[in-house]
Amino acid sequence: MVDHILFVGFAIGFPVLTGPVYLRRRTAMLAGDPSVRTREYVETIAWLSAMGLVTVGVWLALGRNLSDIGLGLGGGWRFATALAAVAGIIALLCVQVRAARTDPEARALAREALEPVREFFPTSRVEARLFRGVSFAAGIGEEIYYRGFLIWYLAGAASVPWAVVLSSLLFGLAHWMHGTQATLRSTATGAVLAGIYLFSGSLWAPMLLHTAIDLTSGETGMAAFSGDNDHSRPDA
């Protein structure tokens, strides 16, 4: 029963409760109201942190092994290979951020790609710090819940491949308020992260990659929509 409540509370409750609120705030965020964007960041950090903390708390309270949801110590060649691959991807993401900051053509391409969700990107140093908090909360909390718990939970009623598909779809739907493109991209990203998790046998590599994706997306978005002003410099 506790597992069912955990499933409904976050997999269903999170997008149902937060999506309409986000859409109501979107106009104000596009208009540049810093208080609205700040509130959105703070509430998002709270939700995503709760995903991870509540999941781990339930797991420990029931006397379960944390390795069952990917939080055991990683090891072996698969784990090392996954970390190496993630490190390579992160390096490419950093190159992308630098290009958005220094190359007008790359910045224009980033602006075009990120336009549908431009309202969510930070526009000041204060917002950038909060966005980093969102990135860490997402990278840790969402991985523990969507990859760790959900794959375990859904595999109890279906095969592991189907659990991966369903958990990825639910992860994508959690981003429905950002539009169809973001939902599809999140679904695909969720499937990739699930693949890394199953290959490595640990959530550490997916958590690292997820956090890096969100951090670099925030930096790229800030550079793209800030143009050549102060916020686009590397030291920002």
Image (cartoon, rainbow, N blue to C red):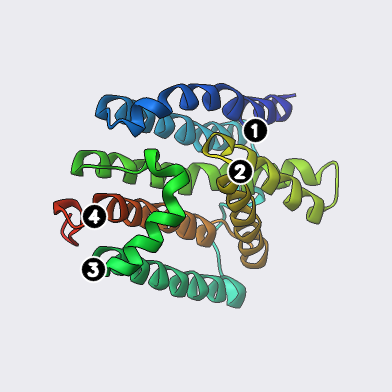
Query: What crowding class fits label 2: few (fewer than 14 Cα within 10 Å), some (14-19), or many (20 or more)?
Result: some
- Work out whether mark 4 precedes mark 1 in sequence or the reverse, and give the earlier one: 1
Q: Nearer the viewer, residue 130 or 233?
A: 233
Mark 2: amino acid = Thr
For label 3, the SS is helix
Disc 3 or 4, which lies upstream in sequence? 3
Up-down: is 71 above or below 43?
Answer: below
Residue 65 shows up from this direction: no
Q: CA distance from mark 4 to mark 1?
A: 37 Å
**Residue bearing the label numbered 3:** 102
Q: Which mark is residue 227?
A: 4
Foreground mark, 2 or 1, reads 2
Local SS, label 4: loop
Percent coordinates x, y for residue 57 in the rendering: 54, 32
The CA distance from mark 2 to mark 1 is: 18 Å
Of labels 3 and 1, earlier in sequence is: 1
Q: Which residue is mark 2?
A: 180
**Image location of residue 37, percent across then percent down:** 33, 31
Note whether 90 is above or below 12 in the view shown: below
Q: In whole angstroms, how far apart are the C-alphas of marks 3 and 2?
A: 30 Å
